[in-house]
Image (spheres, rainbow, N blue to C red):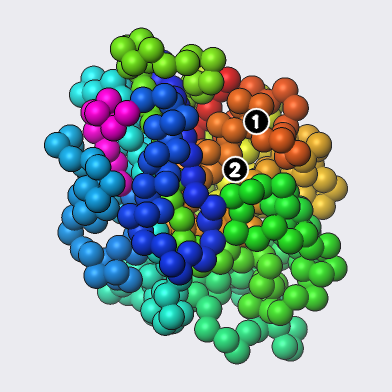
Amino acid sequence: MSQAIYVAGIAMTVFGRHPQRSLADLAQEALQGALRDAGCAIADLGAAYYAGMTNGPLQGQWAIPGQVVLGRIGISGIPIYNVENACASGSSAFNLAVQSLRAGTTDVALALGAEKMNIDDKARAFAVFEAGWDVSRVEENYQRLVAMGEGVVAPPGTQSDRPYSRFMDIYAAMCRWHMKTYGTTQRQIAAVCAKNHGHSVNNPYSQFRKPFTIDEVLAAPPITYPITLPMCAPLSDGAAAAIVCTEDGLRRLGLDRRRCIRVAASVLRSFGTRGLDQPEQHVGRLAALQAYEMAGLGPSDMHVAEVHDASAMGEIIQAENLGLASLGQGGACAERGDFTLGGRVPINTSGGLESKGHPLGATGIGQLHELVTQLRGEAGARQVQGARHAIQENGGGLQGIEEAAVAIHILSK
């Protein structure tokens, strides 16, 4: 990147169910935590990027959610941008904050994501995900995507009769495609899930902190084969905020450089038009290659990763896209412990979306919070020893046969 940019402050709430707390209350906790972490004040911010997906459909606050939420917690006068990019909204806000620094429009910027997803009407909450593709072609989208799983027969009794997002049918189809193409097994997918739930036990910000064995994951209530309940990210409330600065910003504010983490690469890329027989052209893989080139680093330099595991299969796919496993080998790597804390390259030390939670607009910044914590050496019992470089992947929506948007960030100590 052309000039050094740093994460000076970052914070998050506990992700989970917060029925008694407002969206603004959650956002305020994240903002105040990030300001304290950086050692600066609201008056020092030059621009703010607000990520939120559910303000309109679940709270009825369309059009200016960022101005409303941030206004309630003391931010006004500066540019406030509303960012909606499906599950990649938070990472997209962070990317835009970085771009504003690179453009010289400010030397200190805020990215903040917040969601309240837990409402009484679960079907309405799950319906939010239905906007993550071309809504004028819903049935066409659905049939095209579930066709990826053809050729693998689901055993009897492996589909839930309770409401769930149809996107889980898509994840299941991706699982089945991987299974028939590379020989990936349901047990390997369960190994990812068990590993992430195990990591979450030591994360105080995680929605779930209960460990599971692989056999317990396999015996859990089914969603749709081969996915069981613990393999899926839950509906979550929560907020996360990051303050990014240029070198000039750090000097102007007299911030503590020792805890600042450099943003070595910030990439946002949109879907392509590849075929199923072109996994090497996956948008996540292309975005990762772009990020590695930007950072002057490669997969072997990464010490820890946070990837988008809205279902456990997502981690396998993205580990391969990031070059942390060869194509088709992500499941085997997970099963033998390569991605477990203490393994070759720990992935989702936070517990991942499956355990930590998935409050859409806050998710990406929550991933970055984990990586900053790791690079600072402040992760406690889940610390990756000697971590100096970290990579994040956060995807959102579907176009064609892949994510509509993918963000990749590389952070360096």
Residue 51, horizontal then vertical, whole percent: 34, 50
Does residue 103 appear in this view? no
Snapshot quadrant of residue 42:
top left
The nearer-to-camera label among 1 and 2 is 1
- Residue found at the very far left of the displayed protein: 77
- Position of the N terminus, as image quadrant, is top left
Magenta residues (range): 41-50
* Cα separation between marks 1 and 2: 16 Å
Characterize the local packing of mark 2: few (<14), some (14-19) or many (20 or more) Cα atoms within 10 angstroms: many
Snapshot quadrant of residue 234:
bottom right
Asked which secondary structure carries label 2, the reply is: strand
Image position of 307 with respect to 387: above or below = below
The label shown at residue 378 is: 1
- Which residue is painted at 40% across and 39% down in the image? 32
Query: Which amino acid is tagged 1?
Result: Glu
**Front-lying residue, 335 or 209:** 209
Residue 43 is a magenta residue: yes
Report the number of numbered marks.
2
**Front-lying residue, 244 or 280:** 244
Snapshot quadrant of residue 298:
top right
Query: Which amino acid is tagged 2?
Result: Glu
- Which residue is painted at 49% across and 45% down in the image? 12
Q: For mark 2, what is the residue?
A: 306
Residue 182, horizontal then vertical, whole percent: 73, 57
- Which residue is painted at 85% across and 68% down in the image? 215
Characterize the local packing of mark 1: few (<14), some (14-19) or many (20 or more) Cα atoms within 10 angstroms: few
**Front-lying residue, 331 or 57:** 57
- Which residue is painted at 77% across and 68% down in the image? 217
